[in-house]
Amino acid sequence: MNANLPRLPILLYHSISAEASPRYQRWAVPPAVFADHLTYLKQQGYTPLTVHRWIRMLADPTIARPLRPILLTFDDGLADFYEGALPLLTEQGCPATLFVTTGWVGKTARWLQSVGEPDRPMLTWRQIIEIDASGIECGAHSVTHPQLDILPVADARREIFDSQRTLADHLGHDIPSFAYPHGYYNPHVHYLVAEAGYSAACAVKNAFSSPADDPLALARLVVTAETNLPRLLADPALPVAPLAESLSTKGWRLARRALRVRAGFL
């Protein structure tokens, strides 16, 4: 554990909604709970930043860093971000980063079939353009939300490059940030993200980030409906990135690849 490094919390939310199927319920944080999270962060003197703003601060020593920075990130691009999260973020003047799965925009979250949510609505392009204009950073989250680390390189490249291109075309500006679907990546995927020109990419790791963290594999802390946020942010047992990839992570990747081979996808 890198106990001497400053602990930067990068929070990972998925859904901000009071409604969810039983198997997806833990990933859906009710708006009232999310509002309490924002109030707590303000009371504790945290300064929310976007992912790109944090990376710019790290790269430019002339930009002053706040005493207690925190990054709020939202994966997937579900419609409930617009309905449940955006009004609260706007009310609090709180910047955040939303990672959009571009292939499902205006459709439903078909990859959530296994947790009973294949019909969960996704944001529309009109909403994403409005969100971007409000000051929320919109980053890419692949095209179809696959496990990038077990895809053929050519397929992973398309997911990484095409999602960035589609977002840039709709929003009219560069897209500097990416989030790995499911948090999964490997050296090949990491290289492709760098090749695409992203300046930052978010993984998961369930660890605090730090100024020494890999900007293309930033550690995040998952927030669920059951998360006690004060306890999470104060937990001394949580590691601080950078972290070496564990043997269990490597083993899980091999297991997932084997399942994909048996299913005839590789």
Image (cartoon, helix red, strand yellow):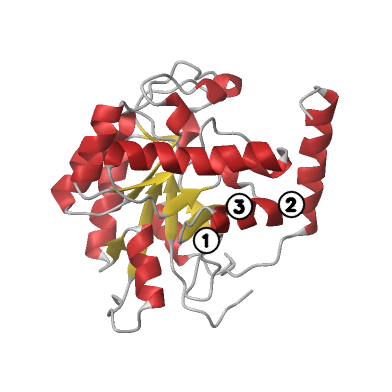
Tell me the residue at 56%/25% (across/down).
111
Q: How far apart are marks 2 and 1 (CA)?
A: 16 Å
Secondary structure under badge 2?
helix
Q: What type is the residue that disc 3 sits on? A: Leu
Tell me the residue at 31%/77% (across/down).
65
Marker disc for residue 192: 3
Look at the image and tell me in which quarter the C terminus lies: top right
Q: How far apart are marks 3 and 1 (CA)?
A: 16 Å
Tell me the residue at 40%/19% (across/down).
107
**Disc 1 target residue:** 218
Q: Distance between the residues labelled 2 and 3?
A: 20 Å
Q: Nearer the viewer, mark 2 or mark 3?
A: 3
Please state if 70 lies on the left or on the right of 160 as rendered.
Answer: left
Please state if 210 lies on the left or on the right of 56 as rendered.
Answer: right
Q: What type is the residue that disc 2 sits on? A: Thr
Considering only vertical position in the picture, is 118 above or below 5? above
Secondary structure under badge 3?
helix
Considering only vertical position in the picture, is 85 above or below 203? above
The residue nearer to you, when weighing 230 against 119, is: 119
- The crowd level at tag 3 (other Cα within 10 Å; few <14, some 14-19, many 20+) is some
- The crowd level at tag 2 (other Cα within 10 Å; few <14, some 14-19, many 20+) is few
Could you say where residue 95 lies in the image, as x and y percent from the top left? 25, 54
Q: Which callout, 2 or 1, points at the residue further toward the start of the chain? A: 1
Could you say where residue 102 lies in the image, as x and y percent from the top left? 43, 32
Q: Nearer the viewer, mark 2 or mark 1?
A: 1
Secondary structure under badge 1?
strand
Q: What type is the residue that disc 1 sits on? A: Leu
